[in-house]
Every structure is written in structure tokens, then in C-alpha cells.
Amino acid sequence: MVKNTSTSVVTIERFIIEQEREHPHATGALSNILADLAVASKMIANKVRLAGLADVLGAEGSQNVQGETQQKLDVISNDIIYKAMDHGGRLCAMASEEMEGIIPIPDQFKKGNYVLLFDPLDGSSNIDVNVPVGTIFSVLRRVTPAGGDGTLDDLLQPGYKQVAAGYVVYGSSTMFVYTTGQGAHGFTLDPSIGEFLLSHPHIRTPDKGRYLSVNEAYEQHWEENVRALIRRYRGMDGRREAMNVRYIGSLVADFHRNLLGGGLFAYPANRKSPTGKLRLLYECNPLAWICEQAGGAAIDGQRRILEVQPTQLHQRSPYFVGSKHDVEIAAEMLATA
């Protein structure tokens, strides 16, 4: 395994190749998917940096499948990822949080053995006020016969079947974090050379976290067991030291801080959203796998999130992800509903 040392400059491409060499039967297709996603994220990072200078701020005027107003950068980012991934011959289908159905691979291109699900620009409503935003992705191996178009069966797989997952955070620096089941690793973009360099090998999140990320504006809509859980995290029942409440409102940014510093991101179900708010396939599953690979955990309040069998492309879920000890508290207290 490649290690980040003071005498070794490791690009993301080199790291991906080194990991591939540990699997003698690998075809290189998954490595190429990750490399293409790294290129797409550089292009999106460039657009984010230009926000405010170019005409990329504000609402685009249309709505996505969830009925949410699309931002201009949502549409731009979605298009960048699609065009970066549609022609390589490694995917048989894609799906995006911003689009209603399956995104087919154009007929003129070879159909591969993988599918890609992605949230092109998480937190985009915050771009106007310079809050970090991000891209989230999940890669699955197709389950239908090779050669043809991908189907819903290929996309609607539980999270434990992911073969790669990752996110990119566009903030004071651009950072690409991914896993293929061999730990979670982070790469920071060096803009002077245009390369992602290994900066955070083998990320480990603390077992007990410092930060609590939850939107307490929904407290009036929570069930009593959820209120009791949040009080526990805040030290209000005398059972534990209070966590620091830090909520940005951009999932990638909150998750990234908690992954590195230790903490819990919670988006419980509530009376207004009884099935939860976050998207299982585009947000919950990929971040959950990364967190588990870093020593953390993720549940929907009752069960491990990666074991949930999806039934819809845009299925929503309650979500508790972060430091293992803090997630275990949620599992214990919410099981006594």
C-alpha cells in the first residue's frame, strides 16, 4: 500500500494504480472510472471558484425530480459528470439526484459492467454565500447480463454492494475522498500543477466525536425519542459530556469535518418528512461506506444503512452517520421507540 511520506509525492492516479495492482484479476475499468471522476471534479472545482465572477450563481429556473429549485451550478455540474463518464465503455447506466430516471449510455458507445450514481453538487443552495459544497458518488457492479443497457436492477442495490464510493468537497481547498473497500483515503488538489495529491491516507475517525451536526429547527416535528437523543448528545440529561453543535447545512461539509474530527451527522425522520429527507442512493450509501471504512458507522435509526434494500431511485431515508460510539447511542435510544 502506498504511504504518504515527506519524500514521496503520490498523485491520485498513482495511488489508484497501486491499489489495482493488489488485485491481479482487475481489468482496470474501475480505476478508470475513478480517474475520470477526478477529472470531472477538477472541472467542477474550476466552476465553483468562478462563482460570482461568471454567470453561475443563483437559481436556474427549473426544478429537479424532488421539486427543489435547481441552481445553475447543479445543472452545470450534472452535465460535466455526464459528459466525462458517458463514453468510456465502462458504465452501462448512470443516475443523478437531479434527473428523474435512468441516464442511459448513448448507443454509439460500448456498455460496460458498472453503474454510477451521483449527487453532482450537494449543498448548492449555499454557493451564493461561499459555503463549501461537494460532489458525492457511488459505483456498483451491474447484475444484469453484460453488453446491454443498464436497468433499474443494476441501480437498486443495497449499499454493501458498492465497489467504490467517494465525495469531493469544494472549500478553501478541493479534496477528493474515496474508498474501494481498502480504507478511506483523501487527496487534496494542488492548483499549481492541477493534480490531486495524497494528503490523508487511511483516514480514521475517532470512536467518540466532538461535533453534533443536526438542524434543530425541526425539533418541533421530532418524535419524543429523537428529542431525547439530541438532548443526550448535548449533555442535557447528565449522561455524557456535551457535544459541540456545528451545522453548516451542506452535507458534504458537515460530514467531512466530522469524519476528520469526530462527530455525528443526524437527519432524523420527522412528522413533515416521515421517511427522512436525504437520498439513500446518492448521499446516504456512499458516505456511510466511507465512514465505515474509516472506523465509523451509519444507520437509518433502526438498522445499518448499507443493508437497506432500495426500491426507488430517489428513495429517502433518515440518517445517522459518524463516530461509532455516537451512532451506537442513536441505535440504542431509537430502538426503544
Image: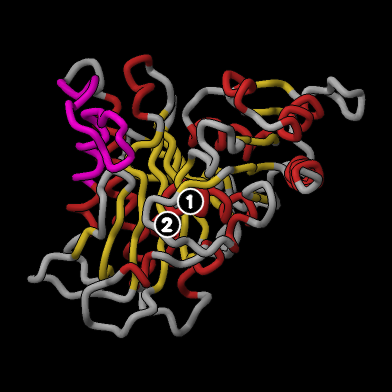
Residue range in magenta is 55-80
Q: Is residue 63 left or right of residue 309?
A: left
Residue at the outermost front position: 271
Q: Amino acid at mark 2?
A: Ser
Say which residue appears at 52% left-offset and 23% top-offset: 248
Q: Which residue is mark 1?
A: 280
Of residues 209 and 148, the one nearer the viewer is 148
Question: Would you call the spot at circle 1 few (<14 residues within 10 Å), some (14-19), or many (20 or more)?
Answer: many
Question: Would you call the spot at circle 2 few (<14 residues within 10 Å), some (14-19), or many (20 or more)?
Answer: many
Specify whether residue 4 is in view: no
Place of residue 140 in the rendered image (x, y in percent of width and height, measured from the top left): 42, 67
Q: Which residue is mark 2?
A: 138
Place of residue 326 in the rendered image (x, y in percent of width and height, measured from the top left): 76, 40
Specify whether residue 145 is in view: yes
Q: Secondary structure at mark 1?
A: helix
Q: Is residue 158 left or right of residue 149?
A: right
Q: Is residue 280 left or right of residue 203?
A: left
Quarter location, residue 53: top left
